[in-house]
Amino acid sequence: MHTRSLKLATVVITGASSGIGRAAAQAFAREGARLVLAARDAEALEQVVEECKAVGAQAIAVPTDVTQNADMENLASSAAVFGEGRIDVWINNAGVGAVGGFDDTPLAAHEQIVQTDLLGYLRGAYVVLPYFKKQHAGVLINTLSVGSWVAQPYAAAYSASKYGLRGLTEALRGELTQWADIHICDVYPAVIDTPGFRDGGNFSGSALKPPPPVYDPRLVAEAMVKLALNPKPSKTVGATAFALRLGHFLLPGFAQLSGLLTGLALKRGRRSATSPGNLFGTPSGEPRIDGGWRSAGFGHEKLLYSAAAVVIGSGLLWCLAKRSNR
Protein backbone atom coordinates (compact mmCIF):
# COMPACT_ATOMS: atom_id res chain seq x y z
CA MET A 1 0.00 0.00 0.00
CA HIS A 2 1.82 3.07 -1.24
CA THR A 3 -0.13 5.91 0.33
CA ARG A 4 0.63 9.42 1.48
CA SER A 5 -2.36 9.46 3.77
CA LEU A 6 -3.94 7.19 6.35
CA LYS A 7 -7.25 9.03 6.23
CA LEU A 8 -9.97 6.39 6.65
CA ALA A 9 -7.46 3.55 6.24
CA THR A 10 -8.58 0.55 8.31
CA VAL A 11 -5.95 -0.13 10.96
CA VAL A 12 -6.09 -3.10 13.35
CA ILE A 13 -3.99 -2.95 16.54
CA THR A 14 -3.67 -5.85 18.98
CA GLY A 15 -2.59 -5.13 22.54
CA ALA A 16 -4.25 -1.72 22.21
CA SER A 17 -5.36 -1.32 25.83
CA SER A 18 -2.03 -0.01 27.19
CA GLY A 19 1.60 0.72 26.45
CA ILE A 20 2.79 0.82 22.85
CA GLY A 21 -0.57 -0.34 21.50
CA ARG A 22 -2.48 2.47 23.20
CA ALA A 23 0.07 5.03 22.01
CA ALA A 24 -0.23 3.63 18.48
CA ALA A 25 -4.03 3.90 18.60
CA GLN A 26 -3.77 7.58 19.47
CA ALA A 27 -1.11 8.21 16.81
CA PHE A 28 -3.14 6.58 14.03
CA ALA A 29 -6.27 8.36 15.25
CA ARG A 30 -4.53 11.69 14.71
CA GLU A 31 -3.88 10.57 11.13
CA GLY A 32 -7.61 10.04 10.61
CA ALA A 33 -7.44 6.25 10.38
CA ARG A 34 -10.40 3.97 10.99
CA LEU A 35 -9.31 2.00 14.05
CA VAL A 36 -10.11 -1.55 15.16
CA LEU A 37 -8.69 -2.01 18.65
CA ALA A 38 -8.09 -5.42 20.20
CA ALA A 39 -7.04 -6.64 23.66
CA ARG A 40 -8.38 -8.87 26.42
CA ASP A 41 -9.45 -5.94 28.64
CA ALA A 42 -12.79 -4.80 27.20
CA GLU A 43 -13.18 -1.92 29.66
CA ALA A 44 -9.75 -0.49 28.89
CA LEU A 45 -10.40 -0.84 25.15
CA GLU A 46 -13.51 1.31 25.45
CA GLN A 47 -11.41 4.01 27.08
CA VAL A 48 -9.01 3.95 24.12
CA VAL A 49 -11.93 4.08 21.67
CA GLU A 50 -13.14 7.26 23.37
CA GLU A 51 -9.64 8.75 23.23
CA CYS A 52 -9.52 8.11 19.48
CA LYS A 53 -12.99 9.50 18.87
CA ALA A 54 -12.03 12.63 20.81
CA VAL A 55 -9.61 13.57 18.01
CA GLY A 56 -12.16 12.85 15.30
CA ALA A 57 -11.27 9.28 14.34
CA GLN A 58 -13.65 6.36 13.88
CA ALA A 59 -12.87 3.48 16.24
CA ILE A 60 -14.35 0.24 17.55
CA ALA A 61 -13.28 -2.20 20.25
CA VAL A 62 -13.12 -5.92 19.57
CA PRO A 63 -12.18 -7.78 22.78
CA THR A 64 -9.69 -10.42 21.65
CA ASP A 65 -7.39 -13.04 23.10
CA VAL A 66 -4.64 -13.56 20.52
CA THR A 67 -4.04 -17.10 21.81
CA GLN A 68 -7.48 -18.14 20.52
CA ASN A 69 -7.98 -18.92 16.83
CA ALA A 70 -11.69 -18.06 16.89
CA ASP A 71 -11.00 -14.67 18.50
CA MET A 72 -8.48 -13.77 15.81
CA GLU A 73 -10.80 -14.85 13.01
CA ASN A 74 -13.53 -12.71 14.56
CA LEU A 75 -11.15 -9.76 14.81
CA ALA A 76 -10.32 -9.94 11.10
CA SER A 77 -13.93 -10.32 9.99
CA SER A 78 -15.08 -7.50 12.29
CA ALA A 79 -12.34 -5.25 10.92
CA ALA A 80 -13.32 -6.02 7.34
CA VAL A 81 -16.95 -5.13 8.04
CA PHE A 82 -15.94 -1.90 9.78
CA GLY A 83 -13.55 -1.09 6.91
CA GLU A 84 -16.17 -1.74 4.22
CA GLY A 85 -14.32 -4.80 2.98
CA ARG A 86 -10.76 -3.56 3.47
CA ILE A 87 -8.02 -4.00 6.04
CA ASP A 88 -5.13 -1.69 5.19
CA VAL A 89 -2.78 -2.02 8.17
CA TRP A 90 -2.56 -4.79 10.76
CA ILE A 91 -0.31 -4.29 13.79
CA ASN A 92 0.65 -7.39 15.76
CA ASN A 93 1.55 -5.87 19.10
CA ALA A 94 -0.02 -7.86 21.97
CA GLY A 95 2.66 -9.28 24.21
CA VAL A 96 3.31 -10.73 27.65
CA GLY A 97 6.45 -11.70 29.48
CA ALA A 98 7.86 -13.22 32.63
CA VAL A 99 11.17 -12.91 34.45
CA GLY A 100 12.70 -15.78 36.37
CA GLY A 101 15.09 -18.68 36.15
CA PHE A 102 14.13 -21.06 33.35
CA ASP A 103 13.28 -23.99 35.61
CA ASP A 104 11.89 -21.73 38.35
CA THR A 105 9.24 -20.47 35.92
CA PRO A 106 6.22 -22.79 35.51
CA LEU A 107 6.02 -24.55 32.18
CA ALA A 108 2.51 -23.17 31.69
CA ALA A 109 3.94 -19.66 31.91
CA HIS A 110 6.57 -20.41 29.25
CA GLU A 111 3.86 -21.87 27.02
CA GLN A 112 1.56 -18.88 27.45
CA ILE A 113 4.33 -16.48 26.46
CA VAL A 114 5.04 -18.41 23.26
CA GLN A 115 1.30 -18.67 22.56
CA THR A 116 0.95 -14.90 22.83
CA ASP A 117 4.24 -13.47 21.58
CA LEU A 118 4.93 -15.88 18.72
CA LEU A 119 1.80 -17.82 17.81
CA GLY A 120 -0.39 -14.76 18.42
CA TYR A 121 1.56 -12.96 15.70
CA LEU A 122 1.37 -15.98 13.42
CA ARG A 123 -2.40 -16.04 13.89
CA GLY A 124 -2.61 -12.34 13.08
CA ALA A 125 -0.67 -12.79 9.85
CA TYR A 126 -2.73 -15.86 8.99
CA VAL A 127 -6.11 -14.13 9.28
CA VAL A 128 -5.16 -10.86 7.57
CA LEU A 129 -3.10 -12.05 4.60
CA PRO A 130 -6.14 -13.31 2.65
CA TYR A 131 -7.59 -9.79 2.82
CA PHE A 132 -4.29 -8.26 1.72
CA LYS A 133 -4.08 -10.65 -1.24
CA LYS A 134 -7.68 -10.02 -2.26
CA GLN A 135 -7.08 -6.25 -2.35
CA HIS A 136 -3.47 -6.65 -3.64
CA ALA A 137 -2.12 -4.40 -0.89
CA GLY A 138 -1.58 -4.15 2.85
CA VAL A 139 0.97 -3.48 5.57
CA LEU A 140 1.63 -5.94 8.39
CA ILE A 141 3.64 -4.38 11.23
CA ASN A 142 5.12 -6.64 13.92
CA THR A 143 6.36 -5.29 17.24
CA LEU A 144 9.52 -7.26 17.83
CA SER A 145 12.24 -6.19 20.25
CA VAL A 146 15.96 -5.73 20.63
CA GLY A 147 15.43 -9.14 22.27
CA SER A 148 14.93 -10.52 18.78
CA TRP A 149 18.69 -10.12 18.30
CA VAL A 150 20.04 -10.14 21.85
CA ALA A 151 18.84 -13.06 23.98
CA GLN A 152 17.56 -12.12 27.42
CA PRO A 153 18.62 -14.52 30.19
CA TYR A 154 15.91 -15.07 32.81
CA ALA A 155 13.31 -14.47 30.08
CA ALA A 156 13.89 -17.56 27.96
CA ALA A 157 10.40 -18.00 26.51
CA TYR A 158 10.24 -14.32 25.61
CA SER A 159 13.60 -14.59 23.85
CA ALA A 160 12.52 -17.75 22.04
CA SER A 161 9.36 -16.01 20.83
CA LYS A 162 11.14 -12.88 19.63
CA TYR A 163 13.87 -14.84 17.84
CA GLY A 164 11.12 -16.95 16.25
CA LEU A 165 9.35 -13.84 14.97
CA ARG A 166 12.40 -12.91 12.92
CA GLY A 167 12.14 -16.25 11.15
CA LEU A 168 8.40 -15.85 10.65
CA THR A 169 8.65 -12.42 9.10
CA GLU A 170 11.56 -13.31 6.83
CA ALA A 171 9.76 -16.43 5.62
CA LEU A 172 6.61 -14.42 4.87
CA ARG A 173 8.62 -11.85 2.93
CA GLY A 174 10.07 -14.67 0.88
CA GLU A 175 6.61 -16.01 0.07
CA LEU A 176 5.19 -12.60 -0.80
CA THR A 177 7.84 -11.43 -3.24
CA GLN A 178 5.30 -11.46 -6.10
CA TRP A 179 2.96 -9.16 -4.13
CA ALA A 180 4.72 -5.82 -4.57
CA ASP A 181 2.24 -3.86 -2.45
CA ILE A 182 2.02 -6.27 0.51
CA HIS A 183 4.64 -5.36 3.09
CA ILE A 184 5.89 -7.13 6.23
CA CYS A 185 7.50 -4.58 8.56
CA ASP A 186 9.27 -5.13 11.87
CA VAL A 187 9.78 -2.59 14.67
CA TYR A 188 12.71 -3.21 17.03
CA PRO A 189 12.30 -1.09 20.19
CA ALA A 190 14.87 -0.81 22.93
CA VAL A 191 13.53 -0.89 26.52
CA ILE A 192 10.25 1.03 26.47
CA ASP A 193 8.49 2.76 29.36
CA THR A 194 5.25 0.77 29.47
CA PRO A 195 3.37 -1.00 32.28
CA GLY A 196 4.87 -4.29 31.05
CA PHE A 197 7.37 -4.64 33.90
CA ARG A 198 4.60 -3.88 36.39
CA ASP A 199 2.12 -6.30 34.85
CA GLY A 200 4.30 -9.18 33.66
CA GLY A 201 4.89 -12.50 35.35
CA ASN A 202 7.59 -12.52 38.00
CA PHE A 203 9.14 -15.76 39.19
CA SER A 204 12.50 -14.27 40.15
CA GLY A 205 11.73 -13.52 43.80
CA SER A 206 12.80 -9.89 43.29
CA ALA A 207 10.93 -6.68 42.47
CA LEU A 208 11.41 -5.79 38.82
CA LYS A 209 12.25 -2.57 37.07
CA PRO A 210 13.61 -2.02 33.56
CA PRO A 211 17.29 -1.22 33.04
CA PRO A 212 17.87 2.38 31.94
CA PRO A 213 17.54 4.09 29.60
CA VAL A 214 13.87 3.51 28.91
CA TYR A 215 12.16 5.23 25.99
CA ASP A 216 8.79 6.86 25.43
CA PRO A 217 6.23 4.45 23.90
CA ARG A 218 5.09 7.26 21.63
CA LEU A 219 8.38 6.98 19.74
CA VAL A 220 7.43 3.42 18.76
CA ALA A 221 3.94 4.59 17.77
CA GLU A 222 5.46 7.27 15.54
CA ALA A 223 7.68 4.64 13.92
CA MET A 224 4.62 2.51 13.19
CA VAL A 225 2.84 5.42 11.51
CA LYS A 226 5.91 6.05 9.36
CA LEU A 227 6.06 2.39 8.35
CA ALA A 228 2.37 2.41 7.43
CA LEU A 229 2.94 5.45 5.21
CA ASN A 230 6.26 4.32 3.73
CA PRO A 231 6.80 0.61 4.37
CA LYS A 232 10.29 -0.79 4.85
CA PRO A 233 11.44 -4.13 6.29
CA SER A 234 12.54 -2.88 9.70
CA LYS A 235 12.88 0.12 11.95
CA THR A 236 14.79 0.37 15.24
CA VAL A 237 13.67 2.66 18.07
CA GLY A 238 16.18 3.71 20.72
CA ALA A 239 19.95 4.13 20.47
CA THR A 240 20.67 1.37 22.99
CA ALA A 241 19.01 -1.12 20.65
CA PHE A 242 21.73 -0.37 18.08
CA ALA A 243 24.49 -0.59 20.71
CA LEU A 244 23.28 -3.90 22.14
CA ARG A 245 22.80 -5.44 18.73
CA LEU A 246 26.29 -4.37 17.67
CA GLY A 247 27.84 -5.69 20.88
CA HIS A 248 26.06 -9.02 20.48
CA PHE A 249 27.22 -9.32 16.87
CA LEU A 250 30.86 -8.42 17.48
CA LEU A 251 31.65 -10.02 20.80
CA PRO A 252 31.42 -13.68 21.82
CA GLY A 253 30.39 -14.14 25.43
CA PHE A 254 27.76 -11.42 25.26
CA ALA A 255 24.96 -13.70 26.48
CA GLN A 256 27.09 -14.96 29.38
CA LEU A 257 27.84 -11.42 30.52
CA SER A 258 24.20 -10.45 30.21
CA GLY A 259 23.18 -13.45 32.28
CA LEU A 260 25.79 -12.66 34.93
CA LEU A 261 24.71 -9.02 35.26
CA THR A 262 20.99 -9.86 35.23
CA GLY A 263 21.46 -12.56 37.85
CA LEU A 264 23.37 -10.18 40.12
CA ALA A 265 20.72 -7.49 39.72
CA LEU A 266 17.96 -9.94 40.63
CA LYS A 267 19.82 -11.16 43.71
CA ARG A 268 20.35 -7.61 44.94
CA GLY A 269 16.80 -6.47 44.23
CA ARG A 270 14.12 -5.99 46.85
CA ARG A 271 12.45 -9.32 47.61
CA SER A 272 9.05 -9.86 46.06
CA ALA A 273 6.45 -12.62 45.93
CA THR A 274 6.18 -14.61 42.73
CA SER A 275 3.20 -13.87 40.51
CA PRO A 276 1.90 -14.87 37.05
CA GLY A 277 0.95 -11.23 36.48
CA ASN A 278 -1.10 -10.73 33.32
CA LEU A 279 -0.08 -14.00 31.67
CA PHE A 280 -3.49 -15.61 32.07
CA GLY A 281 -5.75 -12.60 32.65
CA THR A 282 -6.06 -8.86 32.35
CA PRO A 283 -3.69 -6.66 34.39
CA SER A 284 -4.84 -5.46 37.80
CA GLY A 285 -3.08 -2.09 37.46
CA GLU A 286 -4.31 1.01 35.68
CA PRO A 287 -4.24 0.59 31.88
CA ARG A 288 -2.16 3.43 30.49
CA ILE A 289 0.57 4.22 27.98
CA ASP A 290 3.43 4.98 30.35
CA GLY A 291 4.95 2.69 32.94
CA GLY A 292 6.41 5.56 34.95
CA TRP A 293 9.99 4.27 34.73
CA ARG A 294 11.56 7.08 32.72
CA SER A 295 14.24 9.23 34.34
CA ALA A 296 14.50 12.73 32.97
CA GLY A 297 18.11 12.87 34.10
CA PHE A 298 19.35 10.02 31.89
CA GLY A 299 20.92 11.88 28.99
CA HIS A 300 22.90 10.94 25.93
CA GLU A 301 26.21 10.98 27.80
CA LYS A 302 25.07 8.34 30.30
CA LEU A 303 23.57 6.34 27.47
CA LEU A 304 26.92 6.26 25.68
CA TYR A 305 28.72 5.29 28.88
CA SER A 306 26.26 2.43 29.42
CA ALA A 307 26.68 1.16 25.88
CA ALA A 308 30.46 1.43 26.13
CA ALA A 309 30.47 -0.46 29.42
CA VAL A 310 28.49 -3.30 27.87
CA VAL A 311 30.80 -3.51 24.88
CA ILE A 312 34.00 -3.27 26.94
CA GLY A 313 32.74 -5.78 29.47
CA SER A 314 31.85 -8.22 26.72
CA GLY A 315 35.28 -7.79 25.21
CA LEU A 316 36.98 -8.50 28.54
CA LEU A 317 34.88 -11.60 29.07
CA TRP A 318 35.80 -12.85 25.62
CA CYS A 319 39.52 -12.23 26.23
CA LEU A 320 39.37 -14.07 29.56
CA ALA A 321 37.60 -17.00 27.95
CA LYS A 322 40.19 -17.17 25.16
CA ARG A 323 43.03 -17.07 27.67
CA SER A 324 41.54 -19.81 29.82
CA ASN A 325 41.30 -22.06 26.77
CA ARG A 326 44.98 -21.81 25.95
Image (tube, rainbow, N blue to C red):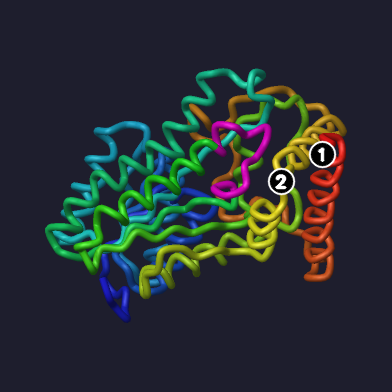
Does residue 320 appear left or right of residue 135 in this picture? Answer: right
Q: Is residue 146 left or right of residue 181?
A: right
User: In this orientation, which residue lies closer to the viewer: 35 or 151?
Assistant: 151
The CA span between labels 2 and 1 is 9 Å
Q: Secondary structure at mark 2?
A: loop
Assess disc 2: are there few (<14), some (14-19) or many (≥20) residues with their C-alpha within 10 Å of its C-alpha. Answer: some
In the picture, which quadrant includes the N terminus?
bottom left
Q: Which residue is identified by label 1?
A: 321
Question: Along the line of sight, which residue is nearer the eye, 1 or 261?
Answer: 261
Range of the magenta residues?
147-159
Q: Earlier in the sequence, mark 2 or mark 1?
A: 2
| Three-letter residue code for mark 2 | Pro
Asked whether residue 34 appears in the rendered view, the answer is: yes
Check the image and report above or below for 25 versus 75.
Answer: below
Where is residue 321 drawn, in percent x and y?
Answer: 82, 39
Q: Residue at x 32, y 68 (%)?
A: 33
Residue 257, relative to residue 193: is it above or below? above
**Looking at the picture, which amino acid does disc 1 mark?**
Ala
User: Looking at the rendering, in which quadrant would you find the C terminus?
Assistant: top right
Query: Mark 1, residues whose alpha carbon is within 10 Å: few (<14), some, or many (≥20)?
Result: few
Q: Position of residue 244 (x, y in %)?
A: 68, 55
- Which quarter of the figure has residue 107? top right
Q: Tell me whether circle 2 and circle 1 mark residues in contact (CB < 8 Å).
A: yes
Query: 72 above or below 184?
Result: above
